[in-house]
Amino acid sequence: MWELNTFSLEERNTPGLTGPDDDFNSDGLINLRVYGAGFDARSTPDPSLLSHHLILEDAGQDYLVIQHQRRTNANDLTWTYERSDDLVTREPADSSSIPKVDNGDGTETWFIRDTLPMSSRNRSFVGIRLSLLP
């Protein structure tokens, strides 16, 4: 449905331009991620608004956090938050311990925190998997 609301018929009929994994304006950001963050695929949003990593101190411990912007009315998307020590084995990341922020523009800012402090592991990765519902 998002493609119908975003692209013209001519654009949708052009291969490699308007699919979820395509990059409409060749800015390095795929259409689905730009849509999910609440932007138009024709725009080039600041990539830090889509997502970026930060370190959060909680009770004297540092945690890896990914902060990202997310469209509030995108019922056609599934967001999966994962953490990993090796990028092979993945497990759910915590998306509930830090309150989300309503940006007042149809988007929210979410904070996804690693489940263990950084000091308890040699390396850690936190990521987002975004899927379009059929």
Image: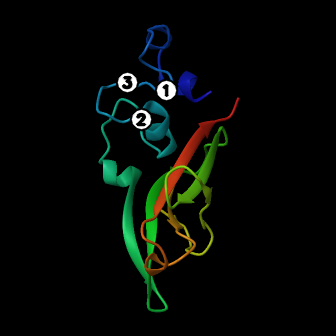
Task: Please report whichever mark, 3 or 2, sits nearer to the chain's N-terminal start.
Answer: 3
In depth, the one of 111 and 87 nearer the eye is: 87
On residue 40, the disc is 2
Element type where label 2 sits in the image:
loop
Element type where label 3 sits in the image:
loop
Please give left or right for residue 21 compared with residue 47 in the image. right
> Label 1, label 3: how many angstroms apart (C-alpha)?
11 Å
Residue 134, position as x, y percentages in the image: 71, 29
Task: Please report whichever mark, 1 or 3, sits nearer to the chain's N-terminal start.
Answer: 1
Quarter location, residue 48: bottom left
Q: Amino acid at mark 2?
A: Asp
Reading the image, the residue beneath label 3 is 24
Residue at point 49% right, 59% down?
126
Tell me whether the residue at label 1 lies in contact with that at label 2, contact meaning CB atoms closer than 8 angstroms: yes
Give the answer, above or below, for where 59 lies relative to 75. Answer: below
Q: Amino acid at mark 1?
A: Thr
